[in-house]
Amino acid sequence: QVQLVESGGDLVQAGGSLRLSCAASGSIFRIDAMGWYRQAPGKQRELVARITRGDSTYYADSVKGRFTISRENAKNTVYLQMNNLKPEDTAVYYCVLVQGGTFWGQGTQVTVSS
Protein backbone atom coordinates (compact mmCIF):
# COMPACT_ATOMS: atom_id res chain seq x y z
CA GLN A 1 0.00 0.00 0.00
CA VAL A 2 1.11 3.53 -0.79
CA GLN A 3 0.19 6.63 1.17
CA LEU A 4 0.38 10.15 -0.19
CA VAL A 5 0.25 13.21 2.02
CA GLU A 6 -0.18 16.60 0.40
CA SER A 7 0.49 19.97 1.95
CA GLY A 8 0.83 23.59 0.94
CA GLY A 9 -2.68 24.49 -0.13
CA ASP A 10 -3.84 27.90 1.02
CA LEU A 11 -5.76 31.05 0.21
CA VAL A 12 -3.70 33.47 -1.87
CA GLN A 13 -4.32 36.59 -3.88
CA ALA A 14 -4.11 36.60 -7.65
CA GLY A 15 -0.52 36.98 -8.76
CA GLY A 16 0.77 35.20 -5.70
CA SER A 17 2.65 31.93 -5.35
CA LEU A 18 2.28 28.65 -3.54
CA ARG A 19 4.30 25.46 -3.35
CA LEU A 20 2.52 22.17 -2.95
CA SER A 21 4.30 19.14 -1.56
CA CYS A 22 3.40 15.48 -1.70
CA ALA A 23 5.27 12.89 0.31
CA ALA A 24 4.86 9.22 -0.54
CA SER A 25 5.35 6.41 1.94
CA GLY A 26 4.59 2.74 2.29
CA SER A 27 5.39 0.13 -0.34
CA ILE A 28 7.53 2.29 -2.61
CA PHE A 29 9.57 0.20 -5.04
CA ARG A 30 9.93 1.88 -8.38
CA ILE A 31 7.92 4.99 -9.04
CA ASP A 32 6.98 5.34 -12.68
CA ALA A 33 5.60 8.85 -12.36
CA MET A 34 4.22 11.38 -9.92
CA GLY A 35 2.02 14.30 -10.64
CA TRP A 36 -0.78 16.64 -9.75
CA TYR A 37 -4.40 16.76 -10.81
CA ARG A 38 -6.92 19.38 -9.84
CA GLN A 39 -10.68 19.58 -9.67
CA ALA A 40 -12.62 22.80 -9.52
CA PRO A 41 -16.25 22.89 -8.40
CA GLY A 42 -18.53 21.60 -11.13
CA LYS A 43 -15.63 20.61 -13.36
CA GLN A 44 -13.88 17.38 -14.23
CA ARG A 45 -10.62 16.46 -12.65
CA GLU A 46 -7.73 17.47 -14.92
CA LEU A 47 -4.04 16.65 -15.10
CA VAL A 48 -1.97 19.70 -14.21
CA ALA A 49 1.59 18.41 -14.28
CA ARG A 50 3.46 15.12 -14.26
CA ILE A 51 7.06 14.03 -13.93
CA THR A 52 8.22 10.58 -14.93
CA ARG A 53 11.01 8.38 -13.63
CA GLY A 54 13.10 9.60 -16.53
CA ASP A 55 12.41 13.22 -15.56
CA SER A 56 10.16 13.85 -18.51
CA THR A 57 7.60 16.50 -17.62
CA TYR A 58 4.14 17.39 -18.85
CA TYR A 59 2.14 20.53 -18.14
CA ALA A 60 -1.39 21.45 -19.00
CA ASP A 61 -1.49 24.37 -21.41
CA SER A 62 -3.26 26.49 -18.83
CA VAL A 63 -0.30 26.34 -16.42
CA LYS A 64 2.71 26.31 -18.76
CA GLY A 65 5.19 29.00 -17.83
CA ARG A 66 3.63 29.45 -14.38
CA PHE A 67 3.86 26.06 -12.68
CA THR A 68 6.93 23.89 -12.20
CA ILE A 69 6.94 20.28 -11.07
CA SER A 70 9.99 18.78 -9.41
CA ARG A 71 10.82 15.85 -7.21
CA GLU A 72 13.20 14.80 -4.49
CA ASN A 73 13.84 11.11 -5.01
CA ALA A 74 15.50 10.50 -1.67
CA LYS A 75 12.33 11.65 0.07
CA ASN A 76 9.85 10.22 -2.44
CA THR A 77 8.42 13.71 -2.61
CA VAL A 78 7.07 15.73 -5.48
CA TYR A 79 6.54 19.48 -5.50
CA LEU A 80 4.45 21.86 -7.53
CA GLN A 81 5.67 25.43 -7.56
CA MET A 82 2.79 27.65 -8.65
CA ASN A 83 3.54 31.24 -9.60
CA ASN A 84 1.38 34.04 -10.93
CA LEU A 85 -1.72 32.30 -9.64
CA LYS A 86 -5.06 33.15 -11.17
CA PRO A 87 -8.59 32.80 -9.79
CA GLU A 88 -9.19 30.02 -12.31
CA ASP A 89 -6.47 27.99 -10.58
CA THR A 90 -8.81 27.61 -7.61
CA ALA A 91 -9.38 23.90 -7.06
CA VAL A 92 -8.61 20.92 -4.92
CA TYR A 93 -5.19 19.65 -5.97
CA TYR A 94 -4.55 15.92 -5.81
CA CYS A 95 -1.20 14.19 -5.83
CA VAL A 96 -0.90 10.98 -7.81
CA LEU A 97 1.76 8.29 -7.89
CA VAL A 98 2.03 5.66 -10.58
CA GLN A 99 3.72 2.43 -9.60
CA GLY A 100 1.97 -0.40 -11.34
CA GLY A 101 -1.37 1.05 -10.34
CA THR A 102 -2.30 4.64 -9.58
CA PHE A 103 -2.46 5.98 -6.06
CA TRP A 104 -4.17 9.22 -5.01
CA GLY A 105 -3.74 11.63 -2.17
CA GLN A 106 -6.61 13.18 -0.24
CA GLY A 107 -6.26 16.58 -1.87
CA THR A 108 -5.31 20.05 -0.73
CA GLN A 109 -7.39 23.17 -1.34
CA VAL A 110 -5.94 26.06 -3.32
CA THR A 111 -8.04 29.20 -3.42
CA VAL A 112 -6.99 32.24 -5.43
CA SER A 113 -8.86 35.45 -4.76
CA SER A 114 -9.17 38.19 -7.33
Image (tube, rainbow, N blue to C red):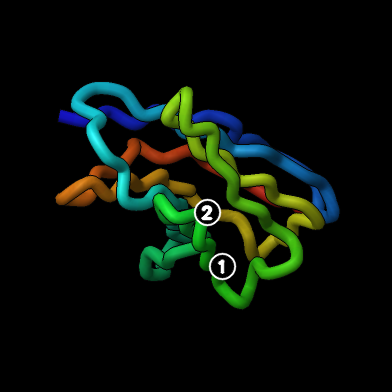
Where residue 98 appears, x then y in whole percent? 27, 50
Under tag 1, what secondary structure? Answer: strand
Q: Does residue 106 appear left or right of residue 73 in this picture?
A: left
Where residue 69 appears, x then y in whole percent? 59, 50
Where residue 18 appears, x then y in whole percent? 71, 40
Mark 2–mark 1 distance (CA, rounded to whole Å): 16 Å
Q: Nearer the viewer, mark 2 or mark 1?
A: 1
Amino acid type at mark 1: Tyr
Q: Which residue is drawn at 65% across and 67% down?
A: 63
Q: Does residue 73 appear left or right of residue 105 in this picture?
A: right
> 97 or 46, which lies in front?
97
Q: Which of marks 2 and 1 is nearer the N terminus?
A: 1
Q: To which residue does mark 2 refer? A: 91
Q: Which mark is residue 59?
A: 1
Measured along the vertical axis of the image, is residue 68 above or below residue 76?
below
Q: Looking at the figure, which quarter contains the C terminus?
A: bottom right
Number of marks present in the image shown:
2
Where residue 83 appears, x then y in whole percent? 77, 52
Q: How crowded is mark 2: few (under 14 residues within 10 Å), some or many (20 or more)?
A: many
